[in-house]
Image (cartoon, helix red, strand yellow):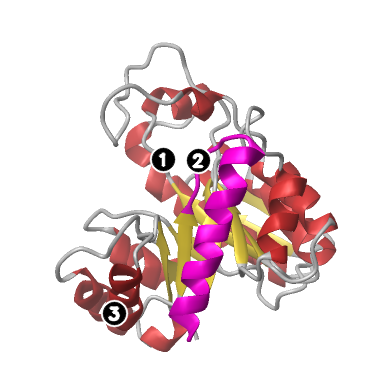
Amino acid sequence: MANFGIQMFPSDQAIQPIELARAVEERELDSLFFPEHTHIPTSRRSPWPAGGELPDYYARTHDPFVALAAAAAVTQRIRLGTGICLVVERDPIQLAKECASLDVISQGRLVLGIGAGWNAEEMENHGVPFSQRWAITREKVLAMKQIWTQDEAEFHGEFIDFDPIWSWPKPRQVGGPPIWIGAGSKWVFDRVADYADGWMPIGGPGSGNLERLREAVERAGRSMSEITLALTGAPMDYDQTRGRMEQGFSELLFAVPPAPPATVLPLLDRCAELARKLRS
């Protein structure tokens, strides 16, 4: 059975997270995902991958963990996820604590969608060389897994290094929240197979990419049954979304714009109606 959720940039000029979360749960949708940018450098040296001018809301997003905590407090059922969290720009010890706390507070409803990002100068402001972003992301994820699962956690890598530490709470979900990688490069398949629990491309998998993922997972000695296929920007079209489900996608996230309630709530109605048809 597929699940259907909503993804929206949680902007300070949009419907607020509490109202949005309540509306998502009331419409019997299954999840709510928030992306993040800590800031946007004014230089605009890095081009927006979608082309054209970068929308203003990229610089106006709430911190996703604050927004998701607010959503957790007013909901009981929906999964709460980052779509995506820029792990490379965050301290892994602090991020492990944030994720564990949110997972406990939400009764085990957190999904940690991650990526390394596209904005080189944004990362540079955090002291991260763009060329090393994925290697650093990997070590931070592996370090967090140690913190989530070990009473005395330690990690010694090229970029992340710490001696044994104590850190509670541990996540409600055994092993920590599931980690889904949101990326579409030719290297993403090995990364998913190496240290993630799911793949969440935008819009569609691309020709041959599901087979590449399957091969990477098998090379790593894992099974595709361990990997969740999640789709961000799922098409608001019955036939197209049904086709993605037939490809194996079990988590479909419809994107709505960061807009006031008068715009967003009718779109949620459309998403909920489409989800009902797809479930039948």
Give amino acid for label 2.
Pro
Q: From mark 2 to mark 1, how far is it between C-alphas?
A: 20 Å
| Quadrant of the image occupied by residue 50 | top left
- From the top left corner, tell me how far across and down residue 39 is, in percent: 55, 25
Label 2 residue SS:
loop
Give amino acid for label 1.
Gly
Find disc 3 in the rendering and name its residue: 247
Find disc 2 in the rendering and name its residue: 257
- From the top left corner, tell me how far across and down residue 245 is, in percent: 36, 78
Comparing labels 2 and 3, the label whose residue is closer to the camera? 2
Counting other residues with Cα less than 10 Å from the Cα at mark 2, is it few (<14), some (14-19), or many (20 or more)?
some
Give amino acid for label 3.
Gln
| Quadrant of the image occupied by residue 205 | bottom left
Is the C-beta separation of discs 2 and 3 under 8 Å? no
Q: From mark 3 to mark 1, how far is it between C-alphas?
A: 26 Å
Which residue appears at 58% of the width and 69% of the height? Answer: 178
User: Toward the viewer: 45 or 203?
Assistant: 203
Find disc 1 in the rendering and name its residue: 117
